[in-house]
Image: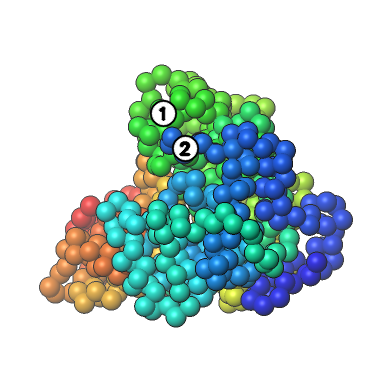
Amino acid sequence: MSQTPPGWQALCPFWPAELAETYRKAGLWQARTFSDILDDLAATHDDRLAVIDGTRRFGYADLRDRSLALACGLYRLGLRRGDRVIVQLPNCAEFIELCFALFRLGVVPVLALPAHRDLEIGQFAAFSEAKACFIPASVEGFDMVAMAHRVQKATPSLRHIVVLGTDLDALYQQDESPEWEAPDAEDVACFQISGGTTGVPKLIPRRHMEYIYNVRCAARASGFSQATRYLCALPMSHNFPMACPGFIGTLMSGGTVVIASNPSPDTCFGLIAEHGVTVTALVPPLVLLWLESVKAPLSLELLQVGGAKLNPSTARRILPELGCRLQQVLGMAEGLICYTGLDDPELRVIQTQGRPMSEWDELRVIRPDGTEAGPGQTGELQVRGPYTIRGYFNRPDVDRESFTPDGFYRSGDIVSRNEDGYLTVEGRDKDQINCGGEKIGVDEVEDLLLYHPSVVDAAVVARPDARMGECACAIVIPRDPRPSALSLRRHLRDAGLAGFKIPDEVIFVASFPQTGVGKINKRQLREMLRQEHFGGEVTA
């Protein structure tokens, strides 16, 4: 087992040799891949129900057999260990089968969201040198196939566009498996995408051995078992519904994954009742939507909420109105996951975002002066541990800013920690907007706005929002002829920006407040938004 796998994976920083050996000897990292796990599950559970997707039912042996058949087809397509591909599928059983097929081959999926468009997919494909792209034909009327062909023209490495349905179905080959080079447990299993990615992507390398440990700890903290029926309502490519513990944790526990095409109450409430769903995961805006829609308590036993801070007043409503316990989750695709305990007192569950799920997690809260904060004091959350990455793929420039010299990840989350080790999120240090759990890097949006001929300058900041937590607000200094808010939004959409990144509000002003060194004072802009002290025109 090599410390640094060969080829491009050397561009994914690894743990120091001594620390890595400590994790191995402690049994945290094991010489197993996700395909090894699935093979064991199929042998143990055989025809036990693994996945429900609409009218389709798949047992554990079915899931193993179908993912193996798909792996054969992908191999014959020309995909080999270490190749990268874009996976942009909606919630469906094929997403799970494709992931496990790729894991078996050692092909590394870049896990894109269905909401991503030309700009983001083009960046991911070019930076990762992706060889294939797996997409649906369309998403909410948007032609994904046409988009993929546009990206392909600009990406020499992108040889294959595989569309969900006929294209993907044709790759399931039941004949004898060809001999392929199996991945190592310390190979990269997949790339998650860092929230707020700007320009050159920040791809998060998750390796088999540490991601399996991540899932195992998460399933234990969440009380998952063979009795678990997990509703996958959030986009399955997100780290939260995938591995925290998500659908992988459900399968590793011998439970059943119930797939929802979308997280709306109209879709999910019926699935919960029909299939006896016991647990699901949501972001705070969806919790509010569910609370507004529920007519009677659901049969759910547990609701996990993460992605953004949950307002305590909303948290208090979950048990009496939805009829289930709340478990708060503070996590990041880079690694660390914190949970409130299943037996914690109500006040702790309502007011905190939990504590680390592994005793091997190392946390510190650092104040602006560089000293460590005491109990109740705020500072930036920094973390390292056996499932927190040591750097992004091929981004030494970002690593220098995002990781300390002694290997702690600078999360950018401003938190306080009580004497029992429970964290409460107080805000963000990084220039990033958290819109309902989706992270928006403001630099990317600002740069695109500045390309508009009628924009002199632009600043994008977060405005507090009762439903989404935060929403993006563009503050623009226009030139004549002054553009409309609609034309600016259309400009961003035409540039290929994902819809969730397009500002909800545009404010036109004559000038920006500045810092002492002449930079835009975004802190003051955010305060002016909160106080509604803008003299310019506001266009929602």
In the image, taking residue 40 as reference, residue 287 lies left or right, namely left
| Residue 503, picture quadrant | bottom left
Q: Residues within 10 Å of mark 1 (few under 14, many from 20)?
A: some
The label shown at residue 269 is 1
Assign the N terminus to one quadrant of the image. Answer: bottom right
Query: Which residue is at the far front?
Result: 175
Q: Position of residue 349 (x, y in %)?
A: 59, 32
Number of labelled discs?
Answer: 2
Q: Position of residue 399 (x, y in %)?
A: 61, 71
Q: In terms of secondary structure, where does tag 1 sit? A: helix
Image height check: is 159 above or below 75?
below
Q: Residues within 10 Å of mark 2 (few under 14, many from 20)?
A: few
Image height check: is 393 above or below 348?
below
Q: Position of residue 290 (x, y in %)?
A: 40, 32
Q: Is residue 83 visible?
A: yes
The residue at which mark 2 appears reads as: 56
The label shown at residue 313 is none
| Residue 394, picture quadrant | bottom right
At label 2, the amino acid type is Arg
Residue at position x 12%, y 73% from top? Answer: 481
Scheme by which the image is coloured:
rainbow
Residue at position x 59%, y 45% from top? Answer: 63
Q: Are marks 2 and 1 in contact (CB under 8 Å)?
A: no
In the image, taking residue 92 as reference, residue 384 lies left or right, namely right
